[in-house]
Amino acid sequence: MRHLERARVAVISLHTSPLDPPGTGDSGGMNVHIRETMVRLADHGVEVDVFTRCAGRGVPEVEPVAPGVRVIQVPAGPCARVEKERLPALLPMFARSFFERGPTSYDLVHAHYWLSGHTARAARRRWRAPLVASFHTLARVKDAARGPGEQAEPEERVRGEASLLHAADRVIAPTPVETGHLIEHYGAPADRLRVVAPGVDRVRFRPRPSLEAKLAWGLADRRVALFVGRLQPHKGPDMAVRAVAAAVRADPAGTRDLELVVAGGPGAASASEPERLRGLARAEGIADRVRLVDSIRHDELPWLYAAADVVLVPSRSESFGLVALEAQASGVPVVAAAVGGLPFIVEDGVTGFLVGRPDPREYAARLVRLLAAPQLGRRMGMAAASRADRFPWEATTSGLVDVYGELVPALGGRDLRAAP
C-alpha cells in the first residue's frame, strides 16, 4: 500500500450525495461506498472534496465532514431533486459551476457513475490530472437482464459510459465479473482495469440478539424474510413477494409465521412501485404477510438485519451487492440471484443459497429449506459473518490508494493534454 501524503482528489458524484440516506431516491450502495472511503482516505494523507449537484438537502454548500474531507454542492438547475432521466441536460451547467467552485486544480479526479463523466473528462483536460472511473452499474449489463415491461437504458447513457471508460487512466470494478463485462460490452483496455471490492463496517454490521431485534421491530412472533433496497424493478422486490407467496403455498404449516419485510423507498422514476407491490401481495393472497417499511437510516439497518431469519436479494442485475454483504456480516443467511457480483459474496450452500434463474419457486424452495432447519440457518449465519471479515472498508480504501498511487507520482512526467 502506498501512502499519498498531501495528495488532493476531486471525487465527482453528480446525481447523488454521500450524505443522502441509502434507499432513498437514487441513493444506494454507491453513496455508502463514497461515504465510507472518503474519511478513510484522509487517514492515508489524501484530501478529498466530493462534488455533488445541489438537490435541496438543507445542508451548507460546502460541508466539512472530517479533517481534509468536504462535500460541495454544485448548483445546476433547480436546487431540488431532479429525475435522473432529466440530469443529462444539466451536465454542461454542472461543469461550469464545478470549475467556478473548485480550486485551480487537483492531483487526481475520481468520477462515480457515468453522469459524472462529462465534468471529469473536462477536468482531466484542463488540469492534466489523471482520471479514475467507477461505474457502479452498467447500461448494457442492465439491458441484458431487464425484465418484462422495463425500459431499455437510454443510448445517451451507453455513449457516456463508453466515453468515460476510454478517457479514464484507471477504471475500478468491484469484482472480476465486472471487468469481464467492461471488456465484453465496451471494449475496455484490460491494462487499465483494477478490482477493488467494496467493504462493510464490521463494527456496525455484526451478529446481534435476534429476539431483541424482533421485539424492537414488532416481529417477536414472526419469522422474517427481509428485502432491503430501492424499490425498482431490477432490484426484484416483486420476486421477493412472489417467492414468499410460493413458499406459503408449498409449505403452509412450515410458513405459518412467515412475514416479508420490504425496506426501502422507490427510485425517482418508480414512485408507483410501493403500490404495485401491495397490489401484487393482494393478488398472491399474502397481503397480511407483507410489510413495507419506508426508507430507514443506514444506522438503523443493523437491527433490521438482526430481526431477519433470511435476506432475499433477487436482483436481475447487481454490480456488487452491498445488501448481501451487510446481511452476511450481520450473521444472516442470504438467498440471492446468481448474477453479477453476488456469487463473489455469497458462497452457495455455505453462507446462503444462489438461485440460478428468476423463478419464485426456486427462491421459495431455498426459503422453505431454511425455515424447516433452524440449525442450518444458524450454521450459515455463522459462516456468513466469518466470510464478511474478508471485506473491511480499510481494505477497500487501501486498494483505492494503491490505484491512485499508480498515477499520482507520475504526474510530472506525463503529458495528458492529448487525452480524449
Image (tube, helix red, strand yellow):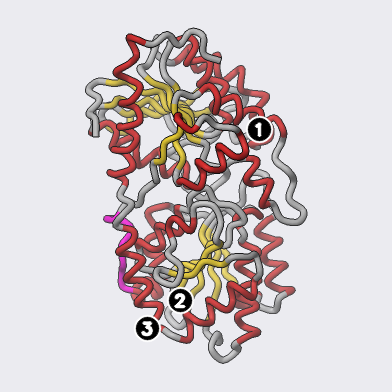
Q: Is residue 233 visible?
A: yes
Query: In the rendered view, would you say 356 is above or below 140?
Result: below
Nearer the observer: mark 2 or 3; the answer is 3
Element type at marker 1? Answer: helix
Toward the viewer: 317 or 17? Answer: 317
Residue at the disc numbered 1: 157
* Kind of residue at disc 1: Arg
Tell me residue 359's x, y (percent): 66, 69
Query: In the rendered view, would you say 4 is above or below 370?
Result: above
* Kind of residue at disc 2: Leu
Cα separation, mark 1 vs mark 3, equals 47 Å
Element type at marker 3? Answer: helix
Residue at the disc numbered 2: 219
Q: State yes or no: residue 205 in magenta.
A: yes
Classify mark 3: residues with Cα within 10 Å, few (<14), some (14-19) or many (20+).
few
Residue at the disc numbered 3: 375
Sequence-wise, which precedes: disc 1 or disc 2? 1
Cα separation, mark 1 vs mark 2, equals 42 Å
Q: State yes or no: residue 386 in magenta.
A: no
x 49%, y 24%: residue: 168
Classify mark 1: residues with Cα within 10 Å, few (<14), some (14-19) or many (20+).
some
- Say left or right for 246 vs 350: right
x 43%, y 38%: residue: 18
Q: Are marks 1 and 3 in contact (CB under 8 Å)?
A: no
Sequence-wise, which precedes: disc 2 or disc 3? 2
Tell me residue 333's x, y (percent): 42, 70
Tell me residue 156's x, y (percent): 69, 30
- Give the residues in magenta: 202-209
Toward the viewer: 392 or 98? Answer: 392
Sequence-wise, which precedes: disc 1 or disc 3? 1
The mark total stands at: 3
The main secondary structure of the magenta stretch is loop
